[in-house]
Amino acid sequence: MKLYLPVERWQSRTTFVFALAIAAVGLGNLWRFAWLMGEHGGAPFFLSYVFCLFAIGVPLLVAEVVLGSHGRGSPFLTMNWATEVSGRSRLWLTVALVSVLAGFLLLVSYLLIAGWSLSWAYQLQLGGFAAISLTGAADYLTGQLSAPAGLLRWQFLAATCLALLASIGVRRGIGLFVWIAVPLLIALMGVLICFSVEFGDLSAAGEYLFAWQTMDFDRGSFMAALGHALYTLCIGVAVGMSYGAYAPDRLPIVRSVLTVALFDVVIAVAAGIVIFPLLFASNLMPAQGFGLLFISVPYAFGNMPFGDLYGALFFLAVFIVTLGTAVALIEPIVSVLEQQFRVRRLQAALAMTGIAFLLSAYATVDLSTAAEGQGFLLWLDTVTSEWLIPAAVVLLALFVGWRMPREVLRQELSREPDILFSLWYFLIRFVAVPVIAFAWLWLSLVP
């Protein structure tokens, strides 16, 4: 029984793939993945990551999309349908509750970075980082945080873009945006790679990223690869369920998700090829996170020929990635308000974007006063990445793999060959559940 048929649905498989692809890229692939590769042995880490992504990440995302594609409603309506057809307790609606909450809290960080990336892009194209010292780049960030009004204006602009896309709707808003964003992101990455190859130290970066350094690869390295694979693809934040509800009928779900995962890997590697040759050419040590994105990268571009222009293009690419993920993260809670509580989409989008903006503004102000290793943003990251998302992923895998009837799943994956369905069903039951449960315990208990 289907509880709700969305008014808007995508007619094209490509639109669905584009929407899920731009959402899945995420910040981790821009400011963390390449650093993890270099620090954990290069090629061995990359191969481990690819294995974890396709053996665990893809089956989990397929499970989310299957729920949304058949439920055709908000995450709560979808899980309500799934419990009914499976004859299971409504307590399993916890999957939707935890996923939607995790996605909304994660949205706060993405809205913050989206605004900051616009600020840095604007400053670069003005020549504000031209011939700057590393200390100067760090001081610029410190100065922005000590007087955050400028950053808050850029965050408000990013929030306005998000509210506009979320309120317009699935076809005219999200659908049109992804058809612009994905080709533009690919073009920008191509241009930036050419710039990095010409002016960066490609050989040093290649040795750092792709060397076969088994001495640097250990159990902790494999867990890092597994952790990154679990947190990419927007798994556990209800994006797959929401976008699955808007997918066209008879979608080859497994093959579509495989395409998304391949795009995710390509962009992650491309980001490393863009960033790290420039860092090595500037005699900078590899880094990750805020320090990489807002200190090292602006310094590197600021000291390269035409770096102001290409640096601005880089931060434009960051904005596209963060906005694409933000649109995906806000959609589950907007659909819940629209379908569950009959709130108009415009009102729901404005309200949720407004709350997210206020939280992101508080996070920005808090960064200037919080002690190292503390603060609101770190608390958000801990709650989402260490508790909510792992809990949602474990519950999702248990429900789809062990509580939903096999025939229902096979019907939704009818476009896939028997061997592909059997492989997915085996992975979601006997690989994903025990591995992610073990990974959750490991990441929670081991420093």
Image: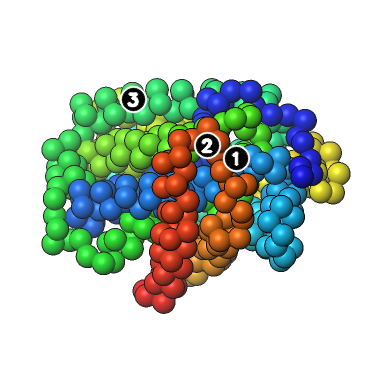
Q: For the point 62% across and 32% down, which residue is it?
A: 247
Q: Which residue is mark 3?
A: 190
Image coordinates of residue 78 in percent, x first then y, are: 70, 48
Q: Are marks 2 and 3 in contact (CB under 8 Å)?
A: no
Residue toward you, 248 or 157: 248
Disc 1 to disc 3, how far (Cα)?
Answer: 37 Å
Q: Quadrant of residue 348?
A: top right
Q: Secondary structure at mark 3?
A: helix
Q: Which residue is mark 2?
A: 253
Q: Are marks 2 and 1 in contact (CB under 8 Å)?
A: yes
Image coordinates of residue 268 in percent, x first then y, are: 35, 41
Which three-letter amino acid code belongs to the residue tagged 2?
Ile
Tell which circle, 2 or 3, labels the residue nearer the N-terminal end. 3
The mark total stands at 3
Q: Which residue is mark 1?
A: 412
Residue toward you, 319 or 144: 319
